[in-house]
Image: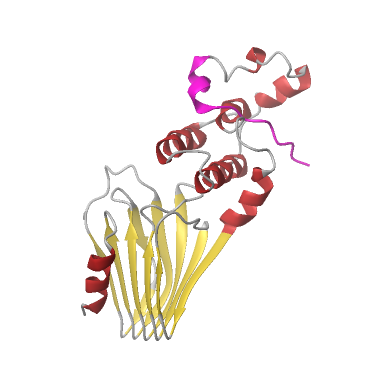
Amino acid sequence: MTRHIAFGAVRGYDEGMTDARSFPSVPARDEAQLELRASDADRDAAAAVLSSALATGRLTSTEHAERLDAVYAAKTLGELAPLTRDLPADAAQASVGMADRAEVSARFSKVIRSGRWVAGRRTRLTSRFGALIVNLSEAVLPGREITLEINAFCGKLIITVPEGAHVIDEGGALFAKRAIYGRKDATGADGPVIRLVGDARFAKVAVYRGRYDPHDAWQRLQER
């Protein structure tokens, strides 16, 4: 059974807080565990806690970005420990489930998902005889990479991603248009990885980088 370690504030981890000996109340056996190498699952769990904290207003977007960078750079549990210690312990279990999957759909209607909302590591986007506008530029992302599962049939899907995002389109198209607009070369970008899978049939799927403008998004939706 995996033991969850209490985590701490990011502003202290570069001032010696990563050293388990700086916590006098930590038993020796816990000090030894803090020296263990962190797994991908450990980093993802910490990232999920941060995402939950951002969604509930406990962290600002700047604090979230700083801590998320530190989470995915962490090599040991001791380096992960300070990053969420000031956040509710019960948020970990809830946010891990919340971060796994999400779904947004538009069927015979127009649906806009924007602002601060929680995307899943795998988010299914369905547009069937409808128009779906999804903005990820202000969304809470559970990690450095998320997968968007596209299911578009006789509909339109417009996705806005952060300016520095890496977009990888691995999906298919049948009598459909799939396009990614914005910076052509994102090699130097430091944003998240947005991976697109799934199919578009008799539909339009367009991805734009940058800030979200609802009027601009609606105009793009009318374009063919």
Q: Height in image: 97 above or below 16?
A: below
Q: Height in image: 39 above or below 224?
A: above
The tally of labels here is 0
From which residue to which does the magenta span run? 1-15
Quadrant in the picture for the C terminus = bottom left
Query: Measured from the top left, where is residue 223 in percent x and y?
Result: 21, 77
Q: Answer with the quarter of the image where residue 16 lies.
A: top right
Q: Nearer the viewer, residue 204 or 7?
A: 7
- Judge whether residue 13 is colored magenta: yes
Tell me which residue sits at (52%, 56%) in the image.
121
Q: Taking 2 as reference, is 197 left or right?
A: left
Query: Measured from the top left, where is residue 59 in percent x and y?
Result: 49, 38
Tell me which residue sits at (60%, 56%) in the image.
98
Query: Measured from the top left, where is residue 60 in percent x and y?
Result: 44, 39
- Judge whether residue 125 is colored magenta: no
Q: Answer with the quarter of the image where residue 171 lies.
A: bottom left
Tell me which residue sits at (22%, 57%) in the image.
182
Quadrant in the picture for the N terminus = top right
Q: Height in image: 9 above or below 113?
A: above
